[in-house]
Image: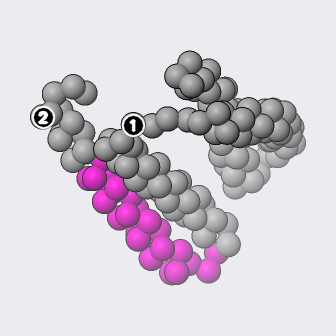
């Protein structure tokens, strides 16, 4: 993204995406307030929480467009600690979720368990990516 036009367009896309996520959050809030069904509420809340997370990530990304991101040696230690502690936790979560899914036959629990398993696998992959990023950022310190 070296050209100013591309950077401006990228920033516009990020800002538009934040508006889209805000809309998803508002819509979810409205539907949650209309429902009395705890399962339906939970399913809608899952989407809402993802949209809230997406918005936070996009806002952080937007902030990073106007600065240089650097990790201090202390930051790298925190990443090391996080990776060390959570790597095993996430692997155990994946195993537990797979076992629970294998034991479930009802559609709503299966749907929720599949979603949780997907999240746990994504967390495990994220920890691997974070560890790779740490290696990249450590080169600059």
Q: Residues within 10 Å of mark 1 (few under 14, many from 20)?
A: few
State which quadrant residue 108 falls in: bottom right
* SS for callout 2: helix
The percent position of residue 138, horizontal first and vertical second, equals: 60, 23
The percent position of residue 52, horizontal first and vertical second, equals: 49, 59
* SS for callout 1: loop
Whether residue 110 is visible, yes or no, is: no
> Separation of disc 2 and disc 1 at Cα?
20 Å
Q: Earlier in the sequence, mark 2 or mark 1?
A: 2
Give the residue pinned by disc 2.
5
- Looking at the image, residue 1 sits to the left or right of residue 131; the answer is left
Q: Residues within 10 Å of mark 2 (few under 14, many from 20)?
A: few
Quadrant assignment for the C terminus: top right
Query: Where 90 falls versus 62 (above or below)?
Result: above
Dot label at residue 68? 1
Q: Nearer the viewer, residue 26 or 103?
A: 26
Q: Nearer the viewer, residue 51 or 102?
A: 51
User: What number of labels is visible?
Assistant: 2
Residues in magenta, as a range: 14-37
């Amino acid at each position: 993204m070296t050209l100013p036009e591309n950077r401006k367009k990228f920033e516009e896309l990020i800002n538009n995406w934040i508006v889209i996520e805000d809309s998803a959050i508002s819509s979810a809030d409205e539907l949650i307030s209309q429902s009395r069904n705890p399962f339906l509420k939970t399913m809608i809340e899952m989407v809402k929480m993802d949209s809230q997370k997406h918005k936070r990530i996009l806002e952080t990304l937007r902030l990073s467009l106007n600065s240089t991101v650097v990790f201090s040696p202390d930051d790298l230690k925190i990443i090391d600690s996080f990776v060390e502690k959570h790597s095993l936790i996430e692997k155990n979560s994946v195993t537990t979720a797979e076992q629970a899914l294998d034991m479930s036959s009802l559609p709503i629990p299966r749907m929720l368990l599949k979603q949780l398993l997907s999240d746990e696998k994504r967390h495990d992959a994220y920890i691997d990516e974070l560890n790779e990023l740490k290696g990249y950022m450590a080169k600059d310190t």
